[in-house]
Amino acid sequence: MVTNLPGHVVDRRRDGKQTVLLHRSMAVIGDDRIEIKSARGTIILPLLGLLLSFAAGWFMVDRGPALPFWLLVGLLLLLIILVPVSVMGLVGALVGADVVVDRRKGSATWQQGYLGMGIGTKELVPFAKIDHLEVCIEGDQPDRWHDLPDDLRQFSLVLVKKSGKRLTICNVPVPAYGQEDGMDRTLAVGQAIAAMTGARIDLPEGWELVEIDTDTGQPIERTAGERAGSRRKPRGKHR
């Protein structure tokens, strides 16, 4: 288990795993497995689909003989499409994952999306083929609109293979004033994956790692007079 992750962006579950909230998803970090999976809120849409299917089925059974033929056919076609899609979406929200980094298998796996329930393999990268991890940021350059930077920042954690192929692990969009929080969330996931895979992690230009005191959350200057016994964790800081 990676223990030096910043506590202000990492929560610990009852089963001992750590979680980091991302964009409509979360990272679940365990001893031998890291998963990027849909946030709990994504279960709502599949449940609504199943409830609608149940209501349509009950309506057909209760009022079937009195309904026009075209309406029965339309409802039947709706159920044929809606039920399997909702079931797959529900399974994906509960047990599926978009990206899985597995220490025991020695590989990182990108899995299928909504219709694939987050289970079918789309890309498989053995640890030996990983060149490095990279944190990228968009929206901070003053060249998008009247030479002004965007009000939003999108942080991305990217895995770069030795072949040069780039695979996005997760995205974290944040307001410009909260960019350090976005960096810390992205970096926390990157540090966990780097510790598991042995790959280095590169930060964007203008950013550096600093140490913070877990009691105060404030950066600690590296001086000879540092307080002994302070617990320190790395976090990102814009220069």
Image (tube, grey):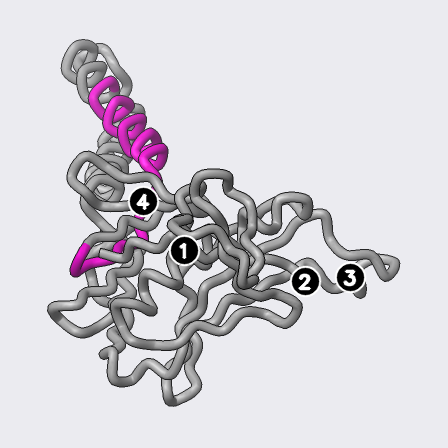
Identify the mark at residue 144; answer none if there is no mark.
Answer: 3
Q: Which residue is mark 4?
A: 19
Q: Which residues are magenta?
A: 31-55
Q: Position of residue 102 (x, y in %)?
A: 19, 65
Q: Which of the two discs, 4 and 1, labels the residue nearer the N terminus?
A: 4
Q: Which mark is residue 98?
A: none
Specify the quadrant of the image occupied by residue 7: top left
147 in magenta:
no
Magenta: predominant secondary structure element? helix
**First-in-chain label (3 vs 2):** 3
Query: Which corner quadrant of the image does residue 175 belong to?
Result: top right
- First-in-chain label (3 vs 4): 4
Alpha-carbon span between mark 4 and mark 1: 10 Å
Q: Nearer the viewer, residue 229 or 204?
A: 229
Of the numbered discs 4 and 2, the one sitting upstream in the chain is 4
Residues under labels 3 and 4: Cα distance? 34 Å
Front position among marks 4 and 2: 2
Of the residues tagged 1 and 2, which is closer to the observer? 2
